[in-house]
Amino acid sequence: MSVPIRIRRRQSGSAGAPGVLKSAELAFNEVDGILYYGKGADASGNATQIVGIGGNASSSYADGIVATERDARIAADNTLTTNLASEVTRAQGSESTISTNLANEITRAQNAESALGTRIDNVLSNVTPGSLDSLSEVVTAFQAADSSLNGAISSLASSASTGLTNEVNRATAAEAALASDISDIETAASALTSRVTSAEGSITANASAISAESTARAAAISAETSARQSAISSEASTRLSADNALSARILVLETEIDGGSF
């Protein structure tokens, strides 16, 4: 008669590995559905490591890797979203400042043109009709009416040119800074995409390795179980034959001794 092979088990209580296992000893926790194996050995024959090798162990490991990568990806996405929002806000602020400065410059130029027109009207109102027959007479009349007109015109032109140049330079610098920031964000996004792709490849490889390892260990345990059952069955058959032979010999001896009675 074959003898069933049993391993240590936990039917109720807490999940997790047993506190102590002998080297190569197996234990199954029915609470979390994981088969544990005692790996390595110390001086007393106890396992130095207790690892999950079957049941829910492989899926729990893979789920842990996936959860870790998912959390890292979510955190990276949140950081990227925050950076993009900050950059958009900064760009909008720069555009608003440029628009305000241009509007101010346009208003200042319009005011200057209006003032210049008023001064020209004043000059013309003081000129006798028919006295502006030549360019020299016009220049003389303007200079006589407003000696500071030439300086005012030159100053206005110089001021407008300088203001416009400064605004163009500032806008160009702001656009360059914005382009640099966008380039940095695109580089970070590309790096994040590469890291996520690499992590996904690692997860796939780990899952395949875990599946292969689980299949190999299950096959090894099945083969070992079959071999031990065959050996036990053979030993039981041999012992049964020996017992039958011994019984037959005892029966013969009993017959010889007292004629078969006992």
Image (cartoon, rainbow, N blue to C red):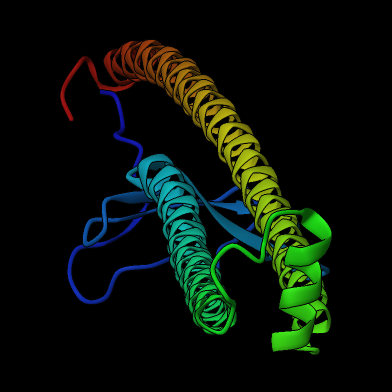
Q: Nearer the viewer, residue 133 or 109?
A: 133
Q: Residue at position x 15%, y 23% from top?
A: 261
Is 166 located above or below residue 6 in the figure? below
Location of residue 146 in the rendering, given as x and y in whole percent from the top left corner:
72, 88
Q: Nearer the viewer, residue 55 or 139?
A: 139
Q: Residue at position x 47%, y 23% from top?
A: 228
Q: Is residue 133 visible?
A: yes
Q: Residue at position x 72%, y 60% from top?
A: 168
The extreme front residue here reads: 130
Query: Quick check: 222 left or right of 41?
Result: left
Is 110 located above or below residue 253 in the figure? below
Location of residue 234 in the rendering, given as x and y in whole percent from the top left corner:
44, 12
Q: Is residue 94 visible?
A: no
Location of residue 2 in the rendering, given as x and y in whole percent from the top left corner:
29, 24
Q: Residue at position x 48%, y 68% from top?
A: 99
For residue 147, which quarter of the picture? bottom right
Location of residue 139 in the rendering, given as x and y in whole percent from the top left corner:
79, 68
Query: Quick check: 147 left or right of 261?
Result: right
- Rendered-image quadrant of the C terminus: top left
Q: Nearer the viewer, residue 10 or 160?
A: 160
- Rendered-image quadrant of the N terminus: top left
Is 102 located above or below residue 41 in the figure? below
